[in-house]
Amino acid sequence: MLTSFALGQTVQWTSSASGKTTSKHGKIVAIIPAGAYPHPIAETLSSGKYSLAPLRGFGLPRNEDTYLVAVEGIGKAKSKLYWPRVSSLTLSQTQESEAA
């Protein structure tokens, strides 16, 4: 069973590319319904606020509700939107300590 998250929650996950593993954390900014592509929703959210680069070449729609996560940019860089697999998401430790 997959975990459900809510808008505004901070989540973390690990991703791998080109032999490098990276931990990411960010806020959930949209819930993508099962069977939907994230790009149309991301474009309505973005209006120049987020970089959509990580969503280029995204896969097929997924069979369960999923999430768009905004990861803050460093310095003046825009925040980036990611569409991680729900199975890889966990509630951020900062979020867990705030809830306690």
Image (cartoon, rainbow, N blue to C red):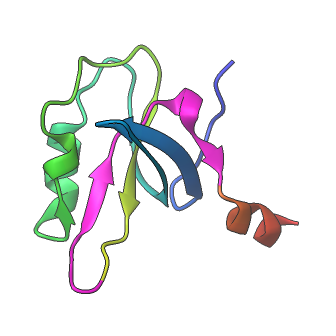
- The residue located at (40%, 37%) in the rendering is 16
The percent position of residue 31, horizontal first and vertical second, equals 42, 41
- Compared across the picture, whether 98 is left or right of 20 comes to right
The percent position of residue 99, horizontal first and vertical second, equals 80, 65
- The answer to whether residue 82 is above or below residue 29 is above
- The residue located at (27%, 24%) in the rendering is 36
Q: Residue lying farthest right?
A: 100
- Compared across the picture, whether 29 is left or right of 46 comes to right
Q: Which of 24 and 40 is in front in this view?
A: 24
Quadrant that contains the C terminus: bottom right
- Kindly indicate the quadrant of the structure image that contains residue 72: bottom left
Q: Nearer the viewer, residue 70 or 88?
A: 88
The percent position of residue 48, horizontal first and vertical second, equals 11, 69
- The residue located at (63%, 36%) in the rendering is 4
Q: What stretch is highlighted in magenta?
A: 75-91
Quadrant that contains the N terminus: top right
- The answer to whether residue 80 is above or below residue 89 is below
- Kindly indicate the quadrant of the structure image that contains residue 63: top left
Residue 92 within the segment the image draws in magenta: no
Q: Residue lying farthest bottom?
A: 75
The percent position of residue 61, horizontal first and vertical second, equals 28, 19
- Compared across the picture, whether 69 is left or right of 43 comes to right
Number of residue marks: 0
- The residue located at (39%, 21%) in the rendering is 34
Residue 87 within the segment the image draws in magenta: yes
- Kindly indicate the quadrant of the structure image that contains residue 77: bottom left
Q: Residue lying farthest top?
A: 63
Q: Residue lying farthest front?
A: 19
